[in-house]
Amino acid sequence: MARFPIEEIFSLCILVVFLLFETCHAHLCLISPTQRGSLAGINKEGNDNCFQIKGPCGKLPQSKDGVIVRPGQTLSVTFQKNLDHFLSSSPGNFTVAFGRATTFQILTTVPDKGEKSLTLYTALVKIPLVKGSYAIQVIYNTNNPKAPAQFFQCADIMVENL
Ligand SMILES: *[C@@H]1O[C@H](CO)[C@@H](O)[C@H](O)[C@H]1NC(C)=O
């Protein structure tokens, strides 16, 4: 008869709990412009700094020193799929939007084609012809019933003429 020492059963339980927990999460990091909060540890999957599920910008406050961009300029937005949740039967996407407070307009959408965790994506967007304090918002729409529907990151920017 097989024997399962208590330590082994315990380790197995921890592993199962860990796997269950991990499959319930997806993560999104916004690298450039830089997301609110920290980017520490983004070379590891499932980074807490990249876990924001409250819209429109996660739970961190607006930061005062956002990068300066010009009205109408083309901005390169780089973000990372920190943890993959692709389902081939219902692929998700990433939207890049511009706005402030609770009003955001989508500037472009990048399809999720099942790239693995830690993949970087770059999207070129045109900043609208406005001035003032705004945010670039990226949403990971997982379209996966086993994960939260959306992950959010925002980077604060200041739109002004140089
Ligand atoms: C992106 O995903 C959202 C949520 O699943 C969906 O409503 C939207 O139509 C998708 N956008 C595109 C361009 O496919």
Image: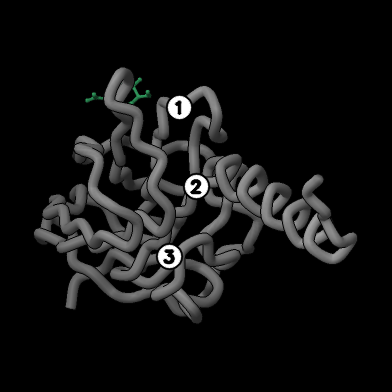
Q: Is any atom of residue 134 visible in this view?
A: no
Residue lying furthest front in this view?
1
Q: Which residue appears at 30% of the width and 39% of the height? A: 95
Residue lying furthest right in this view?
6
Report how far apart the C-alphas of labels 2 and 3 lie in the structure: 23 Å
Q: Which residue appears at 52% of the width and 23% of the height? A: 145
Report how far apart the C-alphas of labels 1 and 2 lie in the structure: 10 Å
Relative vertical location of residue 49 with respect to residue 91 in this rendering, above or below:
below
Q: Earlier in the sequence, mark 2 or mark 3?
A: 2
Depth order, front residue of 53/113: 113
Q: Which mark is residue 156?
A: 3
Name the spot of residue 152 as percent of width and height, x first.
48, 48
Q: Nearer the viewer, mark 1 or mark 3?
A: 1
Label pair 1/2, CB-CB below 8 angstroms: yes
Q: Nearer the viewer, mark 2 or mark 3?
A: 2
Q: Residues within 10 Å of mark 1 (few under 14, many from 20)?
A: some
Q: Which residue appears at 56% of the width and 43% of the height? A: 23
Q: Which residue position is annotated with label 2? A: 26
Q: Which residue position is annotated with label 1? A: 144
